[in-house]
Amino acid sequence: MKELLLQILKSYSAIMPRTTITIILLLVYVIAIIAIGIWNSKNDSSEDYFLASRKLPAWLLAITFIASWWGGGSAIDLVDHAHKNGLSSFWIYGVPVLIATALMYL
């Protein structure tokens, strides 16, 4: 069975290079995401879209805040800052997130 799979993969890769396969899969993914977005569009305006129709619960708002904080440039800058200053970088980057998250629940 293993030899058969390897033979199929070798013959398939001989037909089409990996970069072409990667581009095709990437295009299929992008088209699928756009189609899902159009299919499920429920918002009347861009304000409703960006503010989630003002219906997010506090816990979900806190999670999105944390994801935005760490997903942005702060995570990249934290590596450089921690390399220079050690674990004390947590006081600059981690504590503000914890405080802001706690304040959201008040």
Image (tube, grey):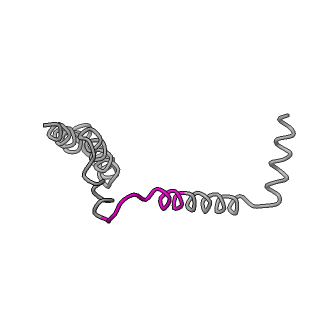
Q: Nearer the viewer, residue 100 or 55?
A: 55
Quadrant into which the N terminus falls? top right
Q: Classify residue 94 as left or right of residue 75.
A: left
Q: Residue at x 22, y 42 (%)?
A: 97
* Residue 61 occupies quadrant: top left
Q: Of all residues shown, which one is farthest toward the top? A: 1
Quadrant into which the C terminus falls? top left
Return the x and y of residue 102 as percentages of the image width and height: 17, 36
Q: Residue at x 81, y 54 (%)?
A: 12
Q: Nearer the viewer, residue 3 or 43?
A: 43
In magenta stretch: residue 43: yes
Q: Nearer the viewer, residue 14 or 52?
A: 52
Above or below, 74 relative to 43? above
Q: Residue at x 28, y 49 (%)?
A: 69
Q: Nearer the viewer, residue 7 or 89?
A: 7
Return the x and y of residue 23 as percentages of the image width and height: 64, 62
In magenta stretch: residue 84: no
Q: Write down the region rendered in magenta.
A: 33-46
